[in-house]
Image (cartoon, rainbow, N blue to C red):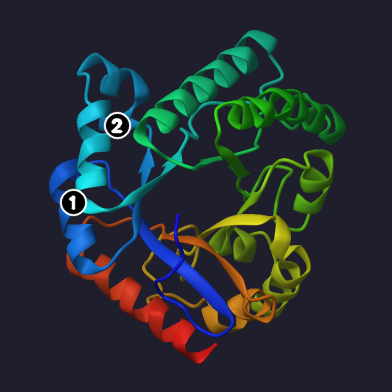
Amino acid sequence: MSTDHGSTDGIDLEVGFTLGLEMPFGETVAWAADEGFQFVELLLDGPYARERLRADDRVPAMRDGLAAAGLDCVVHLPFAVDPGSPFSPVREGAVRELTLGMDTARELGAERVVFHPSSDAWDLGWDPAETRAFVHDALDDLVPAARERGLVPCPENVVSSHYTAANFPELLERHPEARMTFDASHALLSGMNEPEMAEFLREHADRVGHLHLPDTRSGDEHLPVGMGRIDFHAALAGLADRCWSGTATLEVGTEDRSTIALGRENLLAVLDRL
């Protein structure tokens, strides 16, 4: 992906948004290009689940539509699977589904795949060390699988599982080929304030491969930037200090185009002040 949009002296972002499950692909991609977005982020679930896309042979047309619009694509692998399951057949099945999703991402022309390094293991039945080991077992397969397909594996900090933002350096050290998806809302909800986000991003900028920038008032609301309480100017200052360039998804829980466009305008205003 090029990085010639949304640029400031300190941070250079390509901006995209989550393509909602009920948003028609071709029409939305055309609108996104007209609006000035550089990519869309596609979650392989619901109507865009991998098996459904393949059953309808939709992937070639989707790739052609992206190319015609001059847009890139980031693929978010399904998070409703459990790669850190304590039950090996479930864990192996989750890894297989996520790996097959990587094949679809490659066919769509994506460069980055986002996934959750999480576990739904019952905390009364499995201690934290065991749960970490289950997640590590999955990552030992998933990170190389992405690289083998020419993709950048970008696991995301989560809220309630082991790999919150605070613990994420452990994952980065264990998997040198991985790059982080830093989710600002998840970081806030797991106890990291904006100055702490800035310090984290400043220290680990070279390992951050993608950003999720949903705003929130309380809980994981997935609001457009500027409609919640996150101070993105303070949070992104650490990346600005490192002259970081990369991709940022407005991970919004709406399919209203005007609201999505407002989030982009608000983010660009933040970047102009960095």
- CA separation in Å, label 2 and label 1: 14 Å
**From this viewpoint, is residue 226 visible?**
no
Image mark for residue 28: 1
Residue 93 location in percent, x, y? Answer: 56, 13
Residue 81 location in percent, x, y? Answer: 52, 26
Image height check: is 240 above or below 39?
A: below
Of tags 2 and 1, which is closer to the observer?
1
Image height check: is 82 above or below 202?
A: above
Three-letter residue code for mark 2: Tyr
Q: Residue at x 40, y 26 (%)?
A: 104
Q: Residue at x 83, y 27 (%)?
A: 130
Residue marked by disc 2: 48
Is 165 or 110 nearer to us in this picture? Answer: 110
Is 170 or 38 nearer to us in this picture? Answer: 38
Q: Residue at x 33, y 72 (%)?
A: 263
Query: Which image quadrant: the N terminus?
Result: bottom left
**From this viewpoint, is residue 183 visible?**
yes
Image quarter for residue 34? bottom left
